[in-house]
Amino acid sequence: MTEGVSSSAATTAVAAAKRRSLWPSVLRWIPTSTDHIIAAEKRLLSIIKTPYEQELVNIGSGPPGSRIRWFRSASDEPRFINTVTFDSKEGSPTLVMVHGYAASQGFFFRNFDALAKHFKIIAIDQLGWGGSSRPDFTCKSTEETEAWFIDSLEEWRKAKNLSNFILLGHSFGGYVAAKYALKHPEHVQHLILVGPAGFTSETEHGSKWLTEFRATWKGAILNHLWESNFTPQRIVRGLGPWGPDLVRRYTSARFGAYASGDVLTDDEARLLTDYVYHTLAAKASGELCLKYIFSFGAFARTPLLHCAPEWKVPTTFIYGVQDWMDYKGAQDARKRMKNVPCEIIRVPQAGHFVFIDNPSAFHSAINYACRKFFSPEKGSHTLSEGLQSV
């Protein structure tokens, strides 16, 4: 009897496969998974000349003693942070790189070779993004959401047995890096915030135009979508086989507008598009943080500006000159940082993704920011021509 049932099930499966094969290829759904993401990452990083190691670092099922778990489940399944570590010279300072919203560590692919000459580079996918675990996201408050990212980063640090490192965060990753440094300053030697999000609140910046925009029908719809946690990734998933073309159009427009002349090659664009598609189309997880961290208009619900007097880590801000993130928020924060040095550098011919738009100038800014960590024989690092200290 069992054998007959198995035979019937196999026949049904074969028939279903044949029906799918009759569908035009353009209408077939594009599959994705963590394995697809890691494979796309490997293809993208094949451009890199510096040898590296990729690993999934086990961070457990939740922070010890915490009421907040990475996922609300009866399972004690461990979670992992996707990590790449690049070969470096012995004694090089450690630079940990944290990506922004709707991104992952592969976005730094144009920087790894140059920075690995001076640093031990470790880049991660935050929990719920890229090739890291994607637990069900069930946080219900700003506090819980911040803990999701800060505590998972701390568990990763413990698993890697790291201390005394330079921490770099881009955009939303800058928000996470800053909040982490506020909670665990003893581990961070220097903080580098690249186009960081979350410095001002709606009441402090732009409330008038936002109020007026919300009163329009377009504004009302967008505000409703925001509060409903409708993310850009849902559009990519919903388009199915047309998703990759949308991502291709996005990468072409986003990463060419401010380029310094060193534009993406055809191979870079193709590999980046493939990588970005798989990271966006995979299971929704960390992306659902958006409404809890920011109000509509990308204004922080708990602005970093309010934390500036508590800053304990020396900090460098880096912005593209055409960055839509306003560097004046950093200037306001610097006025309140009474106990630590703070520098602000603006990079020409670059937008929000300054490290892709103008990588050579970005590397110069990083080396200048970290000049105190280099020995004299490695040469002095001065602010290169074209970079602006403000």
Image (cartoon, helix red, strand yellow):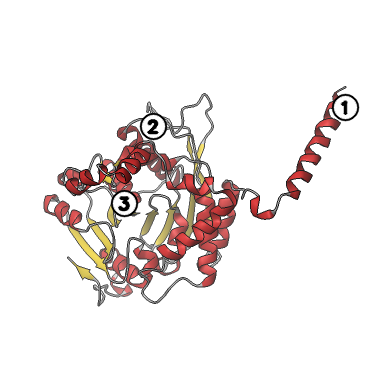
Q: Nearer the viewer, residue 155 or 234?
A: 234
Judged from the image, the secondary structure of the residue bearing numbered disc 1 is helix
Q: Residues within 10 Å of mark 1 (few under 14, many from 20)?
A: few
- Amino acid marked by disc 3: Gly
Please identify the quadrant where the N terminus is shown.
Answer: top right
| 145 versus 38 height, above or below | above
Residue under label 3: 174
Q: Nearer the viewer, residue 299 or 241?
A: 241
N-terminal label among 2 and 3: 2
Instruction: Give the percent coordinates (x, y) of residue 227.
Output: 34, 37
- Amino acid marked by disc 2: Cys
Quarter of the rendering containing residue 77 = top right
- Amino acid marked by disc 1: Gly
Judged from the image, the secondary structure of the residue bearing numbered disc 2 is loop
| 168 versus 348 height, above or below | above
**Residue with the most extreme front position:** 217
Q: Which of the two discs, 2 and 3, sits closer to the camera? A: 2
Q: Which of the two discs, 1 and 2, sits closer to the camera? A: 1
Q: CA distance from mark 2 to mark 3?
A: 20 Å
Instruction: Give the percent coordinates (x, y) of residue 93.
Output: 35, 60
| 330 versus 271 height, above or below | above
Q: Is residue 221 visible?
A: yes
Which labelled disc corresponds to residue 139?
2
Q: Residues within 10 Å of mark 3 (few under 14, many from 20)?
A: many
Quarter of the rendering containing residue 152 = top left
Instruction: Give the percent coordinates (x, y) of residue 336.
Output: 12, 50
Q: Nearer the viewer, residue 71 or 247?
A: 247
Q: Residue at x 48, y 44 (%)?
A: 234
Residue under label 1: 4
Judged from the image, the secondary structure of the residue bearing numbered disc 3 is helix
